[in-house]
Amino acid sequence: MPIALTIVGNINVDFLFRAEKPPSPGENLVAKDHQISPGGKGANQAVAAARLGAKVTVVGRVGRDPFGQLLTRNLEREEIDVSRISIDPSKPTGTAFVTVMPSGENAILSSLGANLALNATCIEQAFATIEDIDGILVQLGIPLSSVDRVIQIGTDLGVPVFLDPTPIRDGLPRLWRYCTSVTPNQSEAALLTGLKTSNIALAFAAAEKMHTMGVRRGVVKLGSKGCVLFDDDGPRRVRPYDVQVVDSTGAGDAFAAALAVRLTEGADFDEAAIFASATAAMACTKAGAQSSLPTRQQVESFLSRRGKRKMLTSGAR
Ligand code: RIB
């Protein structure tokens, strides 16, 4: 039986430009090419989880415009339940401008539009009709009060709530530390904990502080350096899988979704984090946020080719 994951988050249309760099003030740059593709952290995580075998329901909001329709249909094609995606009568569908540089790194400017109209009432109405929930995954591309409502509902239901705390705009959800796992990158971890996270030793301290503050399983993502973990068993590090990076857009989403899927399935933290790290590495090898997301079978064959346990080191090293 597949696990049932409810994913609450933003749905965007991505305008992806391949260019040497994003323009600076006063500059008028020409990109190598561009593509328009489905994105948004909530939608990317939903597609990632569905391809990894979860039964996914999305709670989100789009505008009454052609992008909203296309993005919803795209999720439906991935066999995701879209019946809790509502349409906002006055706000446009969320939109992101993504510059992908030759190194595969990206710079993103997004406007959340209708995503910011997914208020606590929409959340309550949506959850009232979802029957099957084994776990909940949420990010910050919707109002913070709605994120808090999601965390509260998940806690009341007694299901794990996974928070990917991005993008951080104007503060944090009040209840973030009550989540089962939280997966910030280094700069987000600094904001959550008030600690510096500029190197791996400091990132370990931030993961430990998240755990001390209440998060059962703290993760700090380190991009090309892997990630660090902290739970009741202390600190560990997952080293990165070496891949040819084409476009890292959506890699963090792939990580968060894969971790949520494996933890909800009952995997232990180390195994789930190695699986998430492999999924994120694979997501960097193709262009686009969703087109690069691998299937369960692809991740499993990658893991059996590349190995699992050698990627893990115990202790803060
Ligand atoms: O994480 C990548 C996503 O961030 C993009 O798809 C873009 O829409 C922004 O929300």
Image: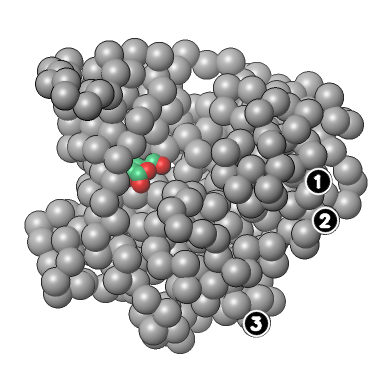
Q: Is residue 38 above or below residue 298?
A: below
Which residue is label 3 attached to? 156
Judging depth in this view, the residue of 9 and 85 nearest the camera is 9
Q: Residue at x 40, y 14 (%)?
A: 103
CB under 8 Å between discs 2 and 3: no
Q: Is mark 3 within 8 Å of ligand 1?
A: no
Quarter of the figure that contains the N terminus: bottom right
Crowdedness near tag 2: few (<14), some (14–19) or many (≥20) residues, C-alpha within 10 Å: some
Residue 227: percent from left, percent from top:
67, 33
Q: Residue at x 31, y 63 (%)?
A: 115
* Dot 2: element: helix
Q: Is residue 220 above or below residue 316?
A: below
Judging depth in this view, the residue of 286 and 170 nearest the camera is 170
Q: Please name the amino acid that badge 1 sits on.
A: Glu
Residue 117: percent from left, percent from top:
29, 71
Q: With 265 as the anchor, is 16 left or right in this view?
A: left
Query: Alpha carbon of mark 2 to alpha carbon of mark 3: how far?
Result: 22 Å
Q: With 62 as the anchor, is 298 left or right in this view?
A: right
Mark nearer the N terminus (2 vs 3): 3
Numbered tag placed on residue 208 in the rendering: 1
Which residue is label 2 attached to? 212
Q: Please name the amino acid that badge 3 sits on.
A: Asp
Quarter of the figure that contains the C terminus: top right
Crowdedness near tag 1: few (<14), some (14–19) or many (≥20) residues, C-alpha within 10 Å: many
Judging depth in this view, the residue of 299 and 171 nearest the camera is 171
Query: Alpha carbon of mark 2 to alpha carbon of mark 1: how far?
Result: 6 Å
Residue 42: percent from left, percent from top:
41, 55
Judging depth in this view, the residue of 212 and 137 nearest the camera is 212
Residue 269: percent from left, percent from top:
76, 46
Q: Please name the amino acid that badge 2 sits on.
A: Thr
Q: Residue at x 23, y 49 (%)?
A: 95
CB under 8 Å between discs 2 and 1: yes
